[in-house]
Amino acid sequence: MAMISTLIMKTPEPLSPLLGVGLYSLPEASSYTGIPADQINRWVFGYRAGGKSHASLWQPALGELEEKTLSFHDLLEIRFVHAFRQYGVSLQSIRAAAGHAREWFDQPYPFTCRRFQTDGQSIFATVMEETGDETLIDLVKRQYAFRQVISASLYAGIDYDSDGEALRWYPLTRSKAVVLDPARHFGKPILAKSGVDTETIAAAYQAEDQNIRRVALIYDLTPAEVEAAIRFERKDAA
């Protein structure tokens, strides 16, 4: 009996299915991407208009949760949807492009995957034929227009695995001090080396009379790391 009890005690508890997924509320997703929360809500969770229900652009990874919550991949994908909408592409065409791209790439989040940079123009050509959406003409016929929408900056800072799937995102331009990694701290923005979340650093900065060196000493960080955390929290990613 003692041996059985020991085995029972050593049996590890099952890991939460939410680990490694990333967890972001609508306000957090808006804060991290600069995209209005109401737009994110419509794209990821669908909406009603004119007495009709409009489906989401894709099935969100955490759609079964009671509170509307985005995963890490949802968070990255909305940045591309925002770029298409800024160019004037309709939600109907974006939805169709996403459907084709999922089939072509075998990826649940096709806009973020690397292949979309090279094959996305062909996908929009197919969508234009199906929908007759004239706003896609430039994207289909002019390479520079497509590159303007699917700019290098959208992919900058994203680390990919060998299959082209996004692993983590460094949101600050020309810096890897701050990272959003679904395998760490539920994907919330943290300092990459220490793991301290940027919100804590920003709060300490205010509490310590905006003294960067004092905050660095408290958390055993470099002043540059503290500055990076503050820059991110101020949403000054340039």
Image: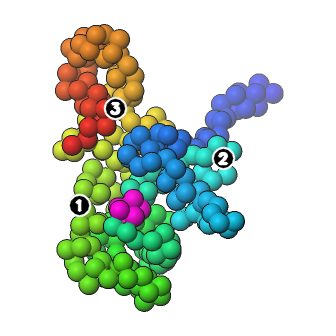
Q: Earlier in the sequence, mark 3 or mark 1?
A: 1
Q: Nearer the viewer, mark 3 or mark 1?
A: 3
**Residue at point 53% right, 65% down?**
57
Task: Check disc 3: other Cα within 10 Å, few if <14, some if 14-19, many if 20+.
Answer: some
Instruction: Identify the element where label 3 is drawn.
Output: helix
Amino acid found under the numbered disc labelled 3? Glu
Left/right of residue 126 with respect to residue 192 in the rendered view: right
Q: Quadrant of residue 201?
A: top left
Q: Main secondary structure of the magenta part?
A: helix
Q: Is residue 83 magenta?
A: yes
Q: Quadrant of the C terminus?
A: top left
Contact (CB < 8 A) between labels 3 and 1? Answer: no
The residue lying toward the viewer, choosing from 175 and 237, is 237
Q: Is residue 160 visible?
A: yes
Residue 29: x and y in percent read 46, 44
Instruction: Identify the element where label 2 is drawn.
Output: loop
**Residue at point 61% right, 41% down?**
16
Q: Is residue 163 visible?
A: no
The residue tagged 3 is: 233
Q: Earlier in the sequence, mark 2 or mark 3?
A: 2
Residue range in magenta is 81-86
Q: CA distance from mark 2 to mark 3?
A: 27 Å
